[in-house]
Image (spheres, helix red, strand yellow):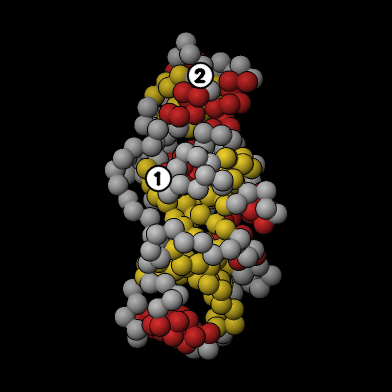
Amino acid sequence: MQDHSSYIAIQGERYAFSEMAAKKFFGDAIEIVPCKTFDDVFVAVISERADYGVLPIENSLTGSIHRVYDLLLGNDLIIVGEVALRIEQHLIAHPGVALKDIRVIYSHPQALEQSRNFLTSLKNVEAVATYDTAGSVKMIRDEKLRDAAAIGSRWAAEDYGMHILKAEIEDIPENYTRFYVLSREPRTFGEANKTSILFSMKSIPGALFKSLSVFALRDIDLLRIESRPLRGKPWEYIFYLDFVGNMNQECCQNAIRHLQEITIQLKVLGSYAAATFNNSKSR
């Protein structure tokens, strides 16, 4: 999918997995806008510094990225696409550094969690969480840390002139991350066959059952449901739900109208083409 004039906001430094996901979705003819936090990505798109944001929403090993769900609730960006990326985690250090020299390993918390088995096998090595995988590689290069390593992509190692000490250290090879493509306005990338919504329910008996039944009554397949605490309202929850179909279909429109009757908040986050999964490796 090419978009030759697009600026794409990602969380992290250049050569992060989010940039790889952005290029898988849009092609190479894009400009990357690196952002320090997930919040900054939303700000970049809302303020028009970027045309789109690409953010991870779920990893097949470690689960959901909860901060992104919270930001979807509090902002008006629309999900216009989805991309899945096979994630390979590599241990990266300066050329000439051996594994026995390493005392600290830096990376994003998700990368550390995905490589837990490898990290626990090391003796006298501290794992330190940072804001980004590629940023960790850049940091140990720039600060000339020869007793440290980072966990990141092969692409980051190559482009920062670093060395892969040990390849593919993730706990399970079938390691995928789903990313959302976010926009200020509706956009079409392929045939929309998936819709994401959020809702909170009225305090009535059987509320969750009734909420889900609006889809079952219309033979609409549910793909995923996630609950998050509703801030400021203890023991109340926001539900994030994905289902098959798009909001141009009458059955989906009717299901949402029915759902509105038993919810106190409902927001359609977007209809878009679902990501396809394959075994091709990330760089």
Q: Is residue 129 above or below residue 96?
A: below
- 267 or 50, which is in the foreground? 50
Q: Which residue is mark 1?
A: 85
Amino acid beneath label 1:
Leu
Percent x, y of residue 264: 59, 82
- 65 or 182, which is in the foreground? 182
Percent x, y of residue 72: 59, 62
Q: Residue at x 57, y 58 (%)?
A: 183
**Could you say which quadrant of the image residue 31 lies in?**
top right
- 7 or 39, which is in the foreground? 7
- 10 Å neighbourhood of mark 1: few (<14), some, or many (≥20)? many
Marks 1 and 2: in contact by CB < 8 Å?
no
**Could you say which quadrant of the image residue 68 lies in?**
bottom right
Q: Is residue 150 above or below residue 282?
A: above
Please state, as top left, top right, bottom left or bottom right, where the C terminus lies in the image.
top left
- 273 or 176, which is in the foreground? 273
Which numbered disc flags the more N-terminal residue, 2 or 1?
A: 1
- Label 2 and label 1: CA atoms lie apart by 23 Å
Residue 191 visible, this orientation: yes
Q: In the drawing, does residue 198 fall left or right of residue 139?
A: left
Amino acid beneath label 2:
Gly
Q: Secondary structure at mark 1?
A: strand
Percent x, y of residue 253: 45, 82
- Rendered image: mark on residue 161: 2
